[in-house]
Image (cartoon, grey):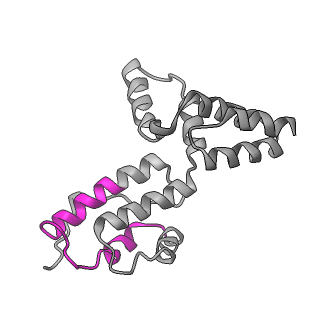
Amino acid sequence: RAFKPQAALKPPFLEKESSHLEVSHFCVLFRAYIMDGYNGVPDGNPINMHLMPLMEPTCHMSLVQRGVKDDKSLDEIINMILEESNARNPLHARRMQLLRIKKSGSHSDFLYQLEQMSDLIDFKSLTCSSLVMHMFLEQSDAEMAKMCQEILAKTPEGDLALLRQEIKR
């Protein structure tokens, strides 16, 4: 089937510095754009060529290195975009950003902002231990921060006992 693009559904250009929230929104819009353009699932049709003009070139090249041109499905391409965003916008930074949000407008705007940010912080792995470790990491020197990040990378739910041992060492 031929691709028939709908200008009204075309997602906005994805910049290199885009936040994880912007990338997530882009993925939702990109899925709708492709599905509508192919009148359903784009069975075997190349999706990469529709993605390229919508992204900043260095971001697209990063996806090419990950294999985006290798006849990937729409879901696989969207997962690759989200993985790239996770690498550019680490989970720690997103969690700390949620904790730093301040009310600047109306209560409903503030609540909306909190709800949007809360979708991006992976609550499944957020435990009391991991939250304490994220707070520790934020205020630590470079050496302690690196050690804490390594522990969080191995155990996303946190391990305060191991952190205590490493600090004593």
Q: Indicate whether 74 appears above or below 131.
A: below
Residue occupying image coordinates x 29% and y 71%: 73
On the image, the x and y values in percent for residue 38 come to: 16, 71
Tell me which corner region of the image, top left, top right, bottom left or bottom right, holds residue 157: top right
Region of the chain picked out in magenta, as a range: 27-56
Q: Indicate whether 29 appears above or below 108.
A: below
Tell me which corner region of the image, top left, top right, bottom left or bottom right, holds residue 131: top right
On the image, the x and y values in percent for residue 96 come to: 60, 35
Residue occupying image coordinates x 65% and y 35%: 134
User: Taking the image as drawn, is residue 31 in sight?
Assistant: yes
Residue occupying image coordinates x 55% and y 51%: 89
Q: How many marks?
A: 0
For residue 45, side relative to residue 162 (left or right): left
- Magenta residue check for 36: yes
Instruction: Identify the image quadrant of the C terminus.
Output: top right
On the image, the x and y values in percent for residue 88 come to: 57, 56
Instruction: Identify the image quadrant of the N terminus.
Output: bottom left
Nearer to us in this view, 124 or 104:
124
Nearer to us in this view, 18 or 117:
117
- Magenta residue check for 7: no
Q: Indicate whether 132 appears above or below 48.
A: above
